[in-house]
Image: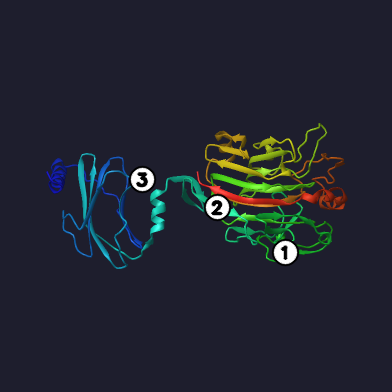
Amino acid sequence: MDYHNKLVLLLLILLIQGHIAYEIPNIALQAFTPSGLRISVPADPEIKLFGVHFNINKDIHELETGEYNEDISRPENGKFTYFNPTLKLKEGDTVYYWVYLQVGDLGYKKDGEKYTVTKLLSIDQFEKARTCAPSITIVDGESSCVGEVILDAKFVSNTIDENIWLIEQYYADEPDFEYVIYKNDSSVLTSQNNLLHIKPKVDEDIVTSNVNIDGCTRKRQHECTRVFINLYQHPVISARLVTKKTFSFGEYKVRAKLPKGDWLFPEIYLEDIEDLSKKIWISYARGNEELTGNNGDDIGGKLLFGGPVVDPLEPKKSRYLKTYRNNQFIGNEMHTFSLRWTSDEMLLYIDDINYGTVSSTILKETGFNSPRKMRLVIGVGAGGPRDFPDNYKSKSYLKPWKSTSNNQVKMFFTSRSNWLPSWKDSELQVEFVKISAL
């Protein structure tokens, strides 16, 4: 029995048995440049076969085989898809078609259909979609493909790619209140020798001056302008880059040499754009070579932190963080810091060492088990009331400010003869930032 007779028999069986009509899903047609036509229908577990029959610019009669025809028996990526890569169409061409679905033991057809080409799509887009295994990683609200490299930022030129990065300019405020003004300052921020360099500096004149930041990237007035009255202004000029795209889930790798210097800290984390207090630290180690408390615990630069932060205040700030203690100051050499984040767990790495796993229970508790709009931050901070606990010693001298004092910035600044000499190797150097879909 030929195909035509088989089809007629199936249709007759459907009519005779009087089953409720199956509603054929919407048929999608796409024409491509330089060539190609795609006809597809969403896959259903009950669909056994999808048959396509069509003519170009010529009507097709009911059950006519057509100039082009094919049966598709297996779905790919959630669709039964017919694709003719060599068929060249132009805008205004019309595809006259009918389709046939075998659903279980029954057959259904949709005839008298036509599609007029109004726009030709890039064939590259189709090839990507056809080979794409859907990923849990979300980029700017859109799904991605497993294994896709979403961002591969290297600093091989003397300029920073501002299609990827926003160079922030603002007066640091909540959630961390670090003693920094972030600027696009060529004496602080450079890209050279295949590395991004951020080298913070102290501006001794600004502490008793008015601050007006040209090109401020923040919307709140007090992050752009400050009038000096009695309280010292932030004395450290540093730099901070953020990705223009947002991400949820995925693998994040940053190869960097962390800054070394008392009261400095790297800013290498994912930041929730809707709640800046919620972060995922990829790499955090204080710049003090030694920082010891009364009980002898050392939280200085040999100790690496990573993981979720949902509150800027201790003890909640450190509640979910994982740590790794190195045998030397971590910023002495370049390392690759990695985060693998899914809805079920976070895995944290320094080079090839997995030093921490954040469980699904904690992800659910912190809200990081569901998609969030996170941007990646690269920067250097200094001081502040929330990154260095009171009553800790940096080698021979006590932390010079109290985190609750109204004069904390002045206390930090006026003790600079103690800490500024330690900033000889204070650069954050970044070789690359790579984000991949999982």
Q: CA distance from mark 1 to mark 2?
A: 30 Å
Image: 354 above or below 276: above
Q: Quadrant of residue 360?
A: top right
Badge 2 element: strand
Q: Which one is nearer the viewer's eye here, 92 or 172?
A: 92
* Mark 2 neighbour density, 10 Å: few (under 14) some (14–19) many (20 or more): some
- Give the secondary structure at mark 3: loop
Contact check, label 3 and label 2, Cβ < 8 Å: no
Q: Which residue is mark 1?
A: 213
The reply, left or right, for residue 337 in relation to residue 146 is right
Which residue is labeled 3 in the image? Answer: 78
Task: List x then y, in percent, for residue 415.
Answer: 87, 50
How far across and how far down the image is residue 362, in percent? 59, 35
Amino acid type, label 3: Gly
Q: Left or right: where does residue 343 sit relative to residue 269?
A: left
Q: Residues within 10 Å of mark 3 (few under 14, many from 20)?
A: few
For residue 399, which numbered disc appears in the image? none
